Amino acid sequence: MSEKIKHVWYASYGSNILEDRFHCYILGGQPKGAKKTNPGCTDKTLPIAKEEVSINHQLYFAKHAKGWDAGGVGFINTKFNDNIQTYGRMYLITVDQFIEVVKQENNFKGELHIDLQQAKEKGSLIVKENSWYGNLLYLGDQKGHPIFTFTNERKLTEAINPPSEQYLLTIMNGLKETYNLSEIKLKEYFEDKVGIKGYAIEKRLAELVKSE
């Protein structure tokens, strides 16, 4: 019989890379630059650890997020690709906190039960169909705890949309905070991403990477 999972690493590849932004999902509150206020978790204990994480799934931007000036937000391709490195940051939180983070990301009301052991064994699990971030992905283990992230159940080819500058700046500041990337590396990281390449915001990257 497998040991009950008590803590998980939540791996973020979007705006939650910025620590203060993610804390709004735990403590509640309105993140800087966003128009949505998060209710937070029942247990407001901050993550007990945080680490860098490399995610072998392609980052892209899609949908129209009201909370980010109708700009696109980050998703990752559901298909694993060993040649892809998406920068992420993961936080060690309780299972109950993780479920509440999933609920906040999906505007889910009511009880949500997630079989994390099944998700780990299968590699992925749809926890809410037809939801933006209803597809749970298992990324491996670190220090005895499973790593999970979430994305869409499909590749949103028909919904590609560039992010707002504020949303992109939030990710950039999170990457600076986590990886201490240079402005050149930051620009190179984003300039080929689907949802940025070929859009007006691509021409703004050189200026945006210098912003705080």
Image (tube, rainbow, N blue to C red):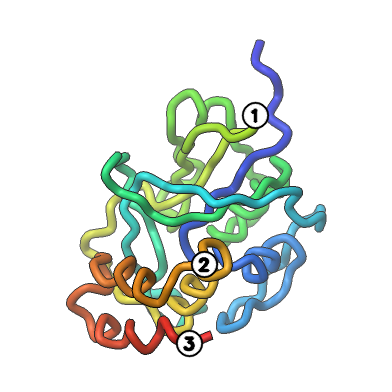
Label 3 secondary element = loop
Q: Which residue type does callout 1 highlight? A: Gly
**Mark earlier in primary sequence (3, 1):** 1
Q: Position of residue 191 (x, y in %)?
A: 26, 72
> Which of the labelled discs sits on residue 180, or is there none?
2
Tell whether label 2 touches label 3 (CB within 8 Å). Answer: no
Rounded to the nearest angstrom, the CA distance separating label 3 from label 1 is 38 Å
> Which of the labelled discs sits on residue 144, or is there none?
1
Q: Is residue 147 above or below residue 102?
A: above
| Residue at x 28%, y 58% (from the top left corner) | 156
Judge left or right: residue 156 versus residue 6: left
For disc 3, the marked residue is: 211
| Residue at x 70%, y 37% (from the top left corner) | 7
Q: Is residue 172 visible?
A: yes
Badge 2: few (under 14), some or many (20 or more) residues near its Cα, within 10 Å? few
Q: Residue furthest top?
A: 1
Q: Which residue type does callout 3 highlight? A: Ser
Specify the quadrant of the image occupied by residue 2.
top right
Rounded to the nearest angstrom, the CA distance separating label 2 from label 1 is 27 Å
Q: Position of residue 127 (x, y in %)?
A: 51, 42
Q: Is residue 152 above or below residue 123?
A: below
Badge 1: few (under 14), some or many (20 or more) residues near its Cα, within 10 Å? few
| Residue at x 67%, y 70% (from the top left corner) | 20
Foreground tag (3 vs 2)? 2
